[in-house]
Amino acid sequence: MNGYTGKFLRVNLETEKITKEDTPKALIENFLGGDGFAIKILYDELKKGIDPFGLENKIIITTGPLTGTGWPASGRMHMATKSPLTGFWGEGNAGGFFGPELKFAGYDFLLIEGKAERPAYLSIDNDIVKINRADGLWGKDTRKTTLHLEKKYPQAQILVIGQAGENRVRYASVIAGFHGAFGRSGLGAVWGAKNLKAIVVKGNKKIGISQPALFSQLAKQAERKVLTNPQAKQLRKYGTNLLLDYKQALGELPTRHHTVGKFEQADKLNIECISKNWTVSSRTCFACPIACKKIYQTKPNSGLPVITVEGPEYHGTVFFGPNLGIADFNFILYACNLCNEYGIDQVSLGSTIAFLIECYEKGLLSKKDVDGISLSWGNKEAVLTLVKKTVNREGIGDLLAEGVKRASEKLGRESKNYALHIKGQEIPAQDARVNPLAGLTQAVSARGADHLRSSINPSAQKTKARDIAQQVKIDEDFYALRDALIVCYYTCGYPQIFTVKDFTQVLPLLTGIEIFSSEKELMKIGERIVNLKRAFNLREGLTIRDDTLPKRFLREPLFSGKGKKQIANLKPMLKYYYEFRGWDEKTGHIKPETLKRLDLEKIVN
Amino acid sequence: MTKLTVKMYTVLKEKTGASTVELEAETVAEALDKLKEKFGKKFILGKSYIFLFNDEIIEKKDFKKTKIKKGDFLHIFPPIAGGSHVLDD
C-alpha cells in the first residue's frame, strides 16, 4: 500500500490486548485519513450516550496520507474522542514529529480502548508494542515526564499528559514534544480517565510511494512555493503573534473577557517589541519550511524564573494577556509555559479565569467564595494562583476545572451571561461582532467554539448572510480535507498556498488511487467528514439551540473598532448555512437526501 | 489636503524602514500614490494586503472615493500567511 502503512494498532488498556489490524480500503477511499479516519471509526465504535470518562470511550490518534512523506508542512497529527468538556465530538491537532514517527513505525492510526488498572504508558518500537507501568511518572508534569522518557527511549517521539489530565480537568491537553499541544476538547482528561500517562513511538520503516520520482519533484516544487512565499516568510520571522497588531487595529483583540476589542496597553505587546525583547530562535515541525514556532526567553530579574521555551502562540498570548488585562509578555510567556507543563488548554483556562474575574467584579461572588483571592483585571499573582488551583482541583479551582458552562450552571444567577462558550467549549480569540464569518463558523462547529474551521481574514469575507454562509460551508469542507491529508493550516488558510488542485496532483502520485485526482471527490470527502461529525453530535443529543453564540456577541456591541455598535446577526446566516449544508432548518438534522448524496445513509442510522 | 497617519507592519515596515508615516492627501488613493513616490520599489503591495481605514477594512475599489478627514489612520497589513506573489496592478 502506498501513502499508507495499511495497518493500525488497537490497544486495550484494561485487557492489555494489543492487535495489529488492516486499515480498510473503503476507509481510505471514503475518508482519506486524519480526522476522516477518526470520525468514521469513532462513529462506528462509540455508542450513543457513553460517559466520556467511562470505559467505553476511546481515543484515536491518526495520521494522513501525506504524513511522513516529505510533502511540506505535513508534520501535524490528529486526535479525537468524545469530549468531556462538551459531551460532543472532541478533536485536536498538534504539530511536531510524532505523526510521521508513528507512520515510520508502521501504523496509520492508534485506537486506545478501556482503562489501565494502574497508571500506564504505551511504547511502540516498530512491531514491538508494550503497555508499561507509569506509577513513577504519575504526578509529574509534562516536561519532567518527557525528559524521563526521552532518556529511556532516545530518538523517540513522545505524547504525555500532566497533572491536569490526571485530575480530569475537563479541558486538559495532551502535549507533544514539550510544546506541541492537542489543546482543546479535553483530550488530556480522557487520557487521565484511562490512566494513560504517555505514548512513546519509534520507527524506521519506509512509506511506500506509488510514483516516487514524480512525487519527489512535485514535493520539491511545493517546498519552493512555501519557502519563497513572502507571507510564510513573515510567519517564519514573527510566528503567530504577528496577529496582535492586526487584531488591535481592527478592534478584535479580546480584552477583559471580550468586553472590548482594543487593549489600551497593546503597544507593549506589538510584534516588534516581542521579537526584539523575547524571541531567541525558531523551531519547526517535520518537513515544514515555514518554521512558525518561536522560542522565547523570559527576562532575568523579573521575579519569575528564567526559562527558554517554545510559544506562546497568538491565542495563548491573548488569553493570558489582554483578555485578563495583562500587558506583561514576560508573565504571559511564563504562564503559558506553565499551562503546557501542567498539560492544560490555555484558551479554556484563560477564558475560565476571565469568567471568574467578571463574576467577582459584578458582585456575583464574594472574596470568600474565591478562596480569599483578590481578583481584578491585570492581577498576575491571582492568575497564577488560579492556574495551580484549577490543575489540582483545589478550592475554587475545582469549579474552574469544570469549564465555564458547568461553572455557571452551578453558580446560577446572572453568571450564565458571562459564560462565553459554544456547546460547552470556551470562545477563542475571534469576535463575531467584528468577524461574522468566524461567528457563524464557531456557532456550527462540531467541537464547539472553534477558530480553525474557516478563514481568519476579514478582508476575504463577504458581508451578506447568504454569501457568508456559503463561504463557511466551503471553508469547512476544505479544512476537513486539510485535516484528513494532514497538512498545516498555514498552507491552506486564506490566502492559500496549496489548493485542492495541488492535492489532486500529489495524491495519485503518492497513493496510486485515481479517485483522488478529482477535485469534486476530494471536496466530497471533506463534506462527508463534516456531516459525519454532525451526525455524531446529533446522536449525542445536539439540537438547533446548540448552534448559537454567547449572549455577549448577540446583544452587546463593541465601542470601537470594526465591531463598533455591531452585534452578531446569526439567525439569517444560520438559515442559509443549513440550506447550503442540506440540513433541516427547523431541526438542524441532516436531510436524508444529503446523507444519500454523501454515501452516509448506511452509516448514519 | 488633510493629514493622514499611515502605519505599516512586518514585511512592509522592514522594506520601507518606516512603521509610521504622516502625509497629506485628499483620498486614500492619493495617499498610496504618495507612499509609492516616497519609497519607490520598497512600497509594493500584494493582492492580499489588508487596508484598515480607521476601523474599517477598505478594498482597492474604495481607495479613490475614501476621503481623508483630520485624525484619520490607515493601517496596511501584509496577510498573515499564505498568499499570492502576484502584485497589484
Image (cartoon, rainbow, N blue to C red):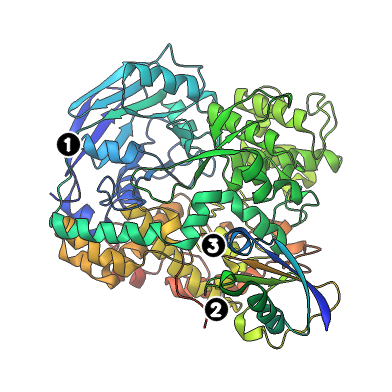
Kindly identify which residue carries mark 1. A205
**Is A186 left, or right, of A401 in this rendering?**
left
Q: Earlier in the sequence, mark 3 or mark 1?
A: 1
| Chain of the residue under the numbered disc 3 shown in the image | A
Q: Which mark is residue A441?
A: 3
Considering every residue shown, the one lying at the far bottom of the view is B65
> Which of labels 1 and 2 is toward the front?
1
A255 or A229: nearer the viewer: A229
Q: Earlier in the sequence, mark 3 or mark 2?
A: 3
Q: Residue at x 50, y 68 (%)?
A: A472
- Considering the numbered disc 2 on the image, is that residue within a helix, a strand or a loop? helix
Three-letter code for the amino acid on which mark 2 is drawn: Arg
Three-letter code for the amino acid on which mark 3 is drawn: Thr
List x then y, in percent, for residue A75. 35, 45
Q: Earlier in the sequence, mark 1 or mark 2?
A: 1
Packing grade of label 1 (10 A; few <14, some 14-19, many >=20) is some
Q: Residue at x 64, y 50 (%)?
A: A271
**Is A129 left, or right, of A331 in this rendering?**
left
Asked whether residue A407 appears in the rendered view, the answer is: yes
List x then y, in percent, for residue A524. 31, 67
Asked whether residue A404 appears in the rendered view, the answer is: no
- Considering the numbered disc 1 on the image, is that residue within a helix, a strand or a loop? loop
Three-letter code for the amino acid on which mark 1 is drawn: Lys
Structural distance between the alpha carbons of marks 3 and 1: 40 Å
List x then y, in percent, for residue B76. 65, 68
**Is B75 left, or right, of A175 in this rendering?**
right
- Tell me if residue A12 comes above or below residue B48 in the rendering: above
Kindly identify which residue carries mark 2. A466
- Tell me if residue A593 comes above or below residue A312 in the rendering: below
